[in-house]
């Protein structure tokens, strides 16, 4: 349920003080998306301001905390992989500031390492995605936007920013971040820099995880100019660096028994994204154009033992127009393209795959009556694929989607959606490239997505749920020297309950997913790059501010239940866990631009690996366990 799962209780935002660090207001969050209330957004999930603020000195796991349908595995940022409804984000269209990201990297690291500190909005379209979200959105889309100067500055000010400091005792991690921004005569600028460094952390059992020390640097620079008529030109660039000694396989805690010659090695990783955009912020009527051009790149260099260098990059662009047929009815139509490559280089070796795609699309969002909302669209894609050696192929396909939402009463809404998506031929992990590959059986992927749900709201209480099915046919993988296709399926349901009151909220989300490959039960190895066996995951969040004070306190409970399906194909089932975290936050009355926060995560020192972390179902893999009890102190000063 989208409104409960990510937006929380609406009453809290109305009570929140302007500038308070942790507010949870669905109206504020959703108004950043002009299509927030369209039928195709009924299953979308929005990360709230509270989650964004909490995660700014943290990582992706903090960003999606409290959202049971989105799981993040991996104990360190470069290994954190995101799964939406049990599907690996490699199979979703991912954009940052409208720029398509190249969803490929060495399978032992993340393809989507993002610093939450530079984000102002995050939306996940689980399963059914609209045609204008981009090409090859097999299982949906993830849309991220970085902060603008206007998000930092107080009304009427031309310069300002904030400083963030944080210290976590487990791993002695020190995080510092600076954001500065200015607006003058239509010109805007924003600069952001963050650094997190520390030592190896210990698990709940007291074991030190070698290679887990924080060593991350992140940068963002944005320039913009907006005329009085609303013509806005924006240029942005961001980069994230993580260059440190890591476990031999960065997403493993180790092997059992250990291999003495394969314990630690250096991973030099860099992720960057650049964008240029034009739009008219005041446009309506039939002429509302938008242009986005950009480049994204992920570099993974592992000097030892082979001098390996992996590059994944993508040029992309979109030209579209929104036809405003009325105040609520729109049609978005346009054309987009990408040019992706995956390259592996080593001593005497250089292998490369590439894919170029041109797509045309249209998406209509209509409200025929006060009760009905319809969204339907289509796109056509033409792709050229170049394999290793002289292999090349041209494929094309159509995609279509339909979403419907209907208000049965003022309190109860039913919704459903379906999509059939042409996925083209995806690039493979460049660290597995081989000159012996045979592409003869390679086929373009196609996905079918179905969702159906109910949402009920009375006062400050919201209850809802949905069922979902995602089937990806001809998902690409490699068996020996042959490039093969597999059929992957994730199905299940999500439930959510939210309740808000003056100064607080409580929110419970639950997700139950099961994955199969070629119709059979699957473990982490079989589902690699497709999804993950997650089973039942539950997240509870509670927060309250004492009336008449600036003191806020709360906590969270993260639960994964035992999952036995992996025992059919792997060595063992996945054990469940329960993790409790608490926090308190205070804004001193004499220093209202300062926010202090103390947090205890994993209060009872539970020894566990997140359900989305690879390898817990195998005897010979030591999964990357999460940190044990950790006390974090942080401060945000605004100027």
Image (cartoon, rainbow, N blue to C red):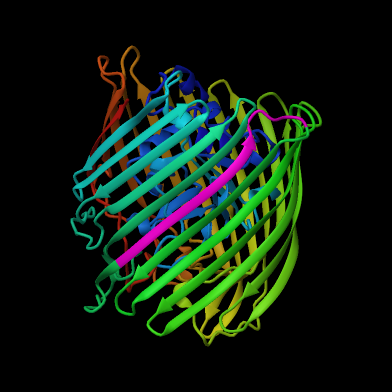
**284 is within the stretch colored magenta:** yes
Quarter of the image for residue 490 reads bottom right
Q: Looking at the image, can residue 368 be seen?
A: yes
Residue at the (48%, 61%) spot, across then down? 532
Query: Which residue is at the front of the view, 219 or 623?
Result: 219
Quarter holding the C terminus? top left
Q: Position of residue 61 (x, y in %)?
A: 39, 48
- The secondary structure that dominates the magenta segment is strand
Q: Position of residue 460 (x, y in %)?
A: 53, 22
Query: Which residue is at the front of the view, 445 or 228?
Result: 228
Residue farthest along the bottom direction in this orientation? 436
Residue at the (76%, 47%) spot, across then down? 362
Query: Which residue is at the front of the view, 116 or 178?
Result: 178
Q: In the figure, is residue 420 to the left or right of 569?
A: right
Quarter of the image for residue 390 reads bottom right
Q: Looking at the image, can residue 422 be seen?
A: no
Residue at the (54%, 68%) spot, across then down? 341
Against 220, is 474 above or below?
A: below
Q: Position of residue 172 (x, y in %)?
A: 18, 48
Quarter holding the N terminus? top right
Against 414, is 282 above or below?
A: above
Against 262, is 473 above or below?
A: above
**371 is within the stretch colored magenta:** no
Q: In the figure, is residue 239 to the left or right of 207?
A: right
Residue farthest along the top direction in this orientation? 548
Query: Which residue is at the front of the view, 490 or 309?
Result: 309
Q: Position of residue 267 (x, y in %)?
A: 32, 66
Quarter of the image for residue 441 reads bottom right
- Give the residues drawn in magenta, as a range: 267-285
Q: In the figure, is residue 523 to the left or right of 639?
A: right
Residue at the (81%, 31%) spot, across then down? 368
């Amino acid at each position: 349920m989208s409104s409960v799962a990510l937006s929380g209780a609406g009453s809290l935002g109305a009570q929140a003080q302007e500038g308070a660090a942790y507010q949870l207001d669905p109206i504020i969050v959703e108004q950043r998306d002009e299509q927030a209330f369209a039928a195709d957004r009924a299953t979308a999930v929005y990360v709230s301001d509270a989650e964004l603020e909490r995660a700014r000195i943290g990582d992706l796991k903090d960003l999606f905390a409290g959202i049971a349908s989105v799981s993040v595995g991996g104990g360190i940022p470069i290994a954190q992989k995101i799964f939406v409804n049990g599907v690996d984000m490699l199979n979703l269209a991912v954009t940052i500031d409208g720029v398509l990201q190249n969803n490929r990297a060495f399978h032992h690291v993340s393809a989507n390492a993002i610093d939450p500190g530079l984000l102002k909005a995050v939306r996940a379209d689980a399963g059914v995605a609209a045609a204008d979200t981009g090409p090859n959105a097999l299982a949906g889309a993830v849309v991220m936007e970085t902060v603008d100067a206007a998000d930092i500055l107080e009304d009427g000010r031309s310069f300002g920013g904030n400083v963030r400091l944080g210290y976590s005792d487990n791993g002695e991690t020190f995080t510092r971040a600076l954001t500065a921004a200015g607006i003058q005569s239509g010109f805007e600028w924003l600069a952001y820099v963050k650094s997190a460094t520390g030592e190896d952390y210990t698990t709940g059992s007291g074991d030190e995880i070698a290679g887990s020390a924080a060593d991350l640097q992140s940068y963002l620079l944005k320039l913009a100019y907006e005329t009085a008529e609303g013509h806005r030109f924006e240029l942005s660039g961001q980069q994230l660096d993580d260059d440190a000694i890591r476990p031999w396989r960065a997403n493993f805690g180790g092997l059992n028994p250990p291999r003495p010659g394969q314990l630690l090695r250096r991973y030099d990783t860099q992720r960057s994204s650049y964008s240029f955009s034009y739009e008219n912020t005041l446009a309506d009527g039939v002429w509302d154009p938008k242009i986005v051009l950009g480049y994204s790149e992920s570099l993974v260099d592992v000097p030892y033992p082979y001098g390996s260098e992996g590059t994944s990059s993508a040029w992309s662009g979109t030209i579209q127009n929104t036809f405003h047929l009325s105040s609520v009815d729109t049609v978005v139509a346009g054309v987009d393209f990408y040019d992706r490559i995956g390259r592996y280089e080593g001593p005497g070796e250089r292998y490369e795959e590439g894919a170029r795609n041109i797509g045309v699309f249209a998406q209509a969002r209509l409200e025929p009556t006060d009760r009905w909302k319809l969204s339907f669209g289509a796109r056509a894609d033409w792709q050229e694929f170049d394999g290793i050696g002289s292999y090349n192929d041209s494929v094309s396909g159509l995609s279509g989607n339909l979403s419907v939402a209907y208000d049965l009463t003022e309190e109860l809404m039913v919704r459903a959606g379906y999509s059939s998506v042409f996925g083209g031929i995806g690039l493979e992990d460049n660290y597995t490239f081989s000159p012996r590959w045979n592409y003869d059986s390679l086929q373009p992927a196609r996905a079918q997505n179905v969702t159906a749900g109910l949402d009920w709201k009375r006062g400050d209480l919201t209850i809802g749920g949905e069922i979902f099915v995602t089937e990806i046919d001809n998902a690409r993988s490699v068996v020996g020297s042959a490039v093969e296709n597999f059929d992957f399926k994730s199905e299940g349901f999500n439930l959510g309950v939210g309740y808000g009151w003056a100064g607080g909220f409580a929110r419970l989300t639950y997700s139950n997913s099961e994955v199969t490959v070629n119709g059979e039960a699957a473990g982490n190895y079989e589902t690699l790059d497709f999804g993950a066996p997650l089973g039942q995951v539950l997240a509870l969040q509670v927060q309250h501010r004492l009336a008449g004070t600036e003191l806020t306190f709360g906590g969270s409970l993260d639960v994964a239940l035992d999952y036995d399906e992996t025992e059919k194909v792997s060595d063992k089932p996945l054990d469940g866990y329960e993790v409790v975290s608490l926090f308190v936050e205070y804004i001193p009355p004499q220093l209202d631009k300062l926010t202090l926060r103390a947090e205890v995560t994993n209060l009872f020192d539970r020894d566990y690996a997140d359900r989305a972390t690879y390898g817990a179902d195998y005897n010979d893999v030591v999964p990357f366990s999460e940190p044990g009890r950790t006390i974090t102190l942080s401060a945000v000063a605004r100027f």
